[in-house]
Image (cartoon, helix red, strand yellow):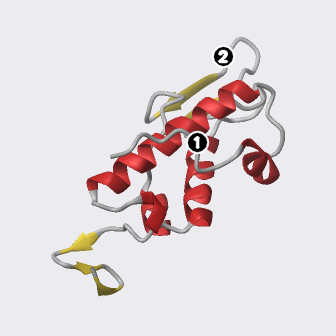
């Protein structure tokens, strides 16, 4: 697999969809992390990223990065599975199914790229593999 040097999603594309981010360097790293994971997933399946629609790669990368890019402290971060707020003496707590900041390729991104779940040699929901 060739080394990926540019993210599949630009900072501008990310901000167009999700708004401004305070730390652009951190956003760039999150986009590269998501890009590398997508490249590995494609490589595992023997698919060259050049053969995949650029817009779909950008969208998948953008979605993955959005789940790990830090947000406003008052907001609930994407990926939180359990949230409690401070009321009186109680404290604000968040629970995550994955460590915060660790991107993951979800079934939704795999489906977007046409790599969804398969049974045998046929893709679920239609057409041959």
Q: Residue at 66% x, 21% y: name it.
A: 92
Q: Residue 122: x and y, percent?
A: 24, 81
Residue at disc 2, secondary structure? loop
Q: Residue 7: x and y, percent?
A: 59, 44
Tag 1 residue: 6
Mark 2 in CB contact with mark 1 (< 8 angstroms): no
Sort mark 1 into few (<14), some (14-19) or many (20+) by Cα contacts within 10 Å: few
On screen, residue 15 above or below 116: above
Residue at disc 1, secondary structure? loop
User: Can residue 80 be seen?
Assistant: no
On screen, residue 113 above or below 88: below
User: Can residue 76 be seen?
Assistant: yes
Sort mark 2 into few (<14), some (14-19) or many (20+) by Cα contacts within 10 Å: few
Q: Which mark is residue 78?
A: none
Q: Quadrant of residue 87?
A: top right
Q: Nearer the viewer, residue 118 or 55?
A: 55
Left or right: residue 101 versus residue 119 is right
Q: Earlier in the sequence, mark 2 or mark 1?
A: 1
Residue extending furthest toward the top: 89
Tag 2 residue: 91
Q: Nearer the viewer, residue 38 or 110?
A: 38
Q: CA distance from mark 2 to mark 1?
A: 41 Å
Q: Residue at 74% x, 51% y: name it.
A: 13
Q: Residue 45: x and y, percent?
A: 28, 59
């Amino acid at each position: 697999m060739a080394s990926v040097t540019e993210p599949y999603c630009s900072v501008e594309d990310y901000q167009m969809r999700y708004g401004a981010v305070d730390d652009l360097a951190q956003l760039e790293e999150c986009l590269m992390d998501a890009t590398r994971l997508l490249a590995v997933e494609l490589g595992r399946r023997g698919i060259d990223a050049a053969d995949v629609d650029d817009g779909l790669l950008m969208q998948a990368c953008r979605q993955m990065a959005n789940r790990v890019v830090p947000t406003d402290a008052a907001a609930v971060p994407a990926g939180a599975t359990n949230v409690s707020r401070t009321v009186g003496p109680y404290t604000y707590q968040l629970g995550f199914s994955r460590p915060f900041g660790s991107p993951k390729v979800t079934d939704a991104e795999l489906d977007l790229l046409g790599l969804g779940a398969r049974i045998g040699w046929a893709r679920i929901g239609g057409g041959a593999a």
